[in-house]
Image (cartoon, helix red, strand yellow):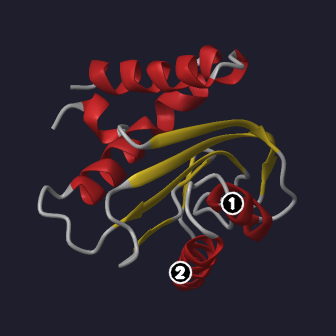
Amino acid sequence: MKVRDIFKNTIVALDVEASSKEELIRKLVDYFPFDKYKKDFIYDTILKRESFGSTGIGDGIAIPHARILLIKELSIIIARLKKPIDFNSIDNKPVKFVFLIVAPPNDPKNRYLITLGKIAELAVELNKNKKLFETNDQNEFLEELIKILEKKK
């Protein structure tokens, strides 16, 4: 699977402000082009997943995620936060970048796990890349992420 294909259904949100993990997840879920019922269900499912253990993977990155029956295909919201927030990360450092992922339970191409793996690979690179902190253009941000991952092949 090509890196670009992973980010086919991706929305980028830059300089998102939130004071808590729950507020941030709510704001990100609201970016999805779904009705209120579906957004509320996604929000509740992701919070339930977080209750089993934080998806803050360290190095300022969190990957809240869930498989949801109501979802037809893998969708991602990528957020760069205006100010880092506590996410109960494994390294106890606040989070600057969040990749919220939802996918259907039936995923024959395994895009969900591939995407989680690719994003985990980004961890160290994200904090070194000045463009990701400086750009105010969502497309430029996403292109820079894709370039980083394509170089790691």
Q: Residue furthest front?
A: 35
The image's mark for residue 67 is none
> Residue 121, percent across and down?
37, 40
What whole-number distance in Å separates the C-alpha atoms at marks 2 and 1? 24 Å
The quadrant the C terminus occupies is top left
In this picture, is 110 found above or below 17? below
Q: Residue furthest right?
A: 19
> Residue 28, percent across and down?
66, 55
Task: Give the residue pinned by disc 1.
Answer: 92
> Residue 15, percent across and down?
78, 35
Query: How dense is the environment of label 2, judged by Cα within 10 Å: few (below 14), some, or many (20 and up)?
Result: some
Element carrying mark 1: loop
What residue is rendered at 64% in x and 16% in y?
130
Residue 127 lies left or right of residue 119; in this view the side is right
What residue is rendered at 54% in x and 48% in y?
77
Specify the amino acid type for callout 2: Thr
Q: Nearer the viewer, residue 64 or 44?
A: 44
Residue 24 image-quadrant placement: bottom right
Residue 27 lies left or right of residue 56; in this view the side is right
Q: Residue furthest left?
A: 108
Q: Nearer the viewer, residue 104 or 114?
A: 104
Residue 70 image-quadrant placement: bottom left
What residue is rendered at 84% in x and 47% in y?
17
Between marks 2 and 1 in the image, the one whose residue lies nearer the viewer: 2
Q: Mark 2 or mark 1, which has the lower sequence index?
A: 2
Task: Give the residue pinned by disc 2.
Answer: 45
What residue is rendered at 46% in x and 26% in y?
145
Residues tagged 2 and 1 counted as in contact (Cβ below 8 A)? no
Specify the amino acid type for callout 1: Asn
> Residue 22, percent across and down?
74, 70
Residue 108 image-quadrant placement: bottom left
